[in-house]
Amino acid sequence: MKRRYEGFAVGIDLGTTYSCVGVWQDQQSRVEIIHNDQGNKTTPSFVAFTENQRLIGDVAHNQASTNPQNTIFDAKRLIGRKFSDAVVQKDIMLWPFKVIPGVNDKPIIIVNYKGEEKQLSAEEISSMVLTKMRETAEAYLESPVKNAVITVPAYFSDAQRKATIDAGTIAGLNVMWIINEPTAAALAYGLDKRSNCDAERNICVFDLGGGTFDVSLLTIKDKVFQVRATAGNTHLGGMDFDNRMVDYFVKEFKKKNKVDITGNPKALRRLRAACERAKRTLSFAVDTTIEVDALFQGIDFCFSISRVRFENINMELFEECMETVDKCLNDAKMTKSSIHDVVLVGGCSRIPKVQQLLQDYFNGKDLCKSINPDEAVACGAAVQAALLSEGGIKNVPNLVLMDVTPLSLGIATGIDVMNVVIPRNTNIPIKKTKRYSTPKDNAVRVSINVYEGERARVGDNNLLGSFWLSGFPRAPRGHPLDVCFGIDENGIITVSAEEKTTGNKNRITITNDKERMSSEEIKRLIQEAEKYQAEDKKYLSKVSAMIALDDYVYSTRHTLKKKDIYSKLSSQEKEKINSAIEKARNLLDDDYQQEEDVFVDCLEDLKSIFEPIIAKSG
Ligand code: ADP
Ligand code: MG
């Protein structure tokens, strides 16, 4: 494998709900998952905007319930999608923030930042999360970080993958590789067990996260990872378990107190946060109590819930997960018994019932839990980053990662039916030709429409591009034409069509350029990102000046009192001090209205008044 990248290279798991960053440590021969400034190894993928500042990660997550309209999460659900996409429309109903259609039907997020309306794309929000992850790594490595491998769900379309690359670019990163999350997890896992890889080994990766669910089947042979099949649900995960708990408790609360909280978003959000905590606890404890003070109309919420109850509430969803595993095995034409390892990934894979159902499905097989489920994906991404970097990884010379098509690719020639040419999960690079026929008598030209997706009707799939093949000889319908699909190692799709008797040919390369941001747009957004950074820095520096002033007022008051200096001062001096302190207090009470230098000047003034007095009083 070519190793082209110099300097530090990190692996970033850009999750729907949580993100995680890791770096390969050559000396220890392992990946270090890097904790953020709050000491946490995963960072909420949240960005918030307030009157005064922009917040990213834990701080944004913590203030979400008091600033719902301006706290953005789930950007990953929007990235690379159209506003009119049914999935987007459904999600919008659940979000407290506003999303509107922009140019080219691109979804635009509206926030209020410093009293002004701002329009942001999903790429920008994701770039802010990626910036936070980059800075987390930079703080730990004490060095700038440029290169990164970023993970995406297996079902991500071409447009979603490319939009993720754009987000990385805006965050000032050089995106070396986009890797499927389950593949990354398996890579982390396979590396741990590399000595076992001589024989062929089949692995099932089960990733149940905060909002998405992925199953992947992989085969490792001679240190080569091959993805055999993937399946998943874009809308199944921890949040759904939390929501079911909320629904349950809303009913219980109504039964007990005769009040309905469904119309009160704030009460619902507080209850949801409490339920999420309870869900985590129930992975370790058999029961727990949920308490929320004055949840609604001054009524306290206090209920206990057992693990069994939690399981019953969510059983349907857990069973759906197992059905997806079954579907994935069928897709890959593999049997349960051919799976050597079942790997758990994602925060919700910690739920005991999920583990038990999965174990039962695999006829009692032991599950692999040796990799921390929150960190496995970032860990694999960090391994891949190191492999692509200068020097690579010692002792692992031939590790190659093979990629697959995440969605089926096919064509429609007139009628609303998807003709699959390359089924999903096909290894790339690949070239495949299929014979079709003209749909009408005496057709002189045929339009070839290229789609990606799993639905039977092309109307329900994603149109990637279309072209005409013309110059047909006069013939009844059913005249043959050959369509050839090619996908290169970078995932670039080329479709060509040929009419054999005349040798007429035409082709199209799917670049998804329409969906992607132009280089000018990216340049503008990079500048914008720098502006946000500068504003954040300026704000933090102002806050330090405010704290310094506040500290000085406090400590001087204390000194005056302690040494009983104040009572010995002349009334003129007293007045001077009092008015100086009042001025400072007023400035500080005025919150964040003033600029930094006002606070700095005020501190200087105070010092010039206090210091001589203190010196005099010795
Ligand atoms: P993502 O979907 O962003 O990849 P993660 O894999 O980190 O996110 O999963 C986040 C989800 O895992 C959240 O819904 C969180 O509540 C849940 N979670 C975290 N820890 C536990 C636990 N101990 N038990 C059950 N669920 C958990
Ligand atoms: Mg994840």
Image (tube, rainbow, N blue to C red):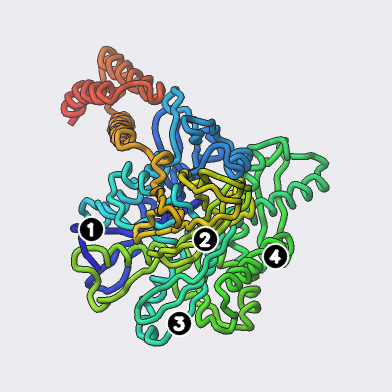
Q: x%, y% of residue 567? A: 31, 23
Q: Amino acid at mark 1?
A: Phe
Q: Which residue is mark 3?
A: 201
Q: Secondary structure at mark 3?
A: strand
Q: Secondary structure at mark 1?
A: loop
Q: Residue at x 39, y 41 (%)?
A: 513
Outermost residue on the front side: it is: 474
The yes-or-no answer for disc 1 within 8 Å of ligand 2 is no
Q: Secondary structure at mark 4?
A: helix
Q: Nearer the viewer, residue 432 or 163?
A: 432
CA–CA distance between discs 3 and 2? 36 Å
Task: First in sequence, mark 2 or 1: give its number.
Answer: 1
Residue 211: tell me if it is visible.
Answer: no
CA–CA distance between discs 2 and 4? 51 Å
Task: First in sequence, mark 1 or 3: give its number.
Answer: 1
Residue 156: tell me if it is visible.
Answer: yes
Q: Nearer the viewer, residue 315 or 465?
A: 465
CA–CA distance between discs 1 and 4? 44 Å
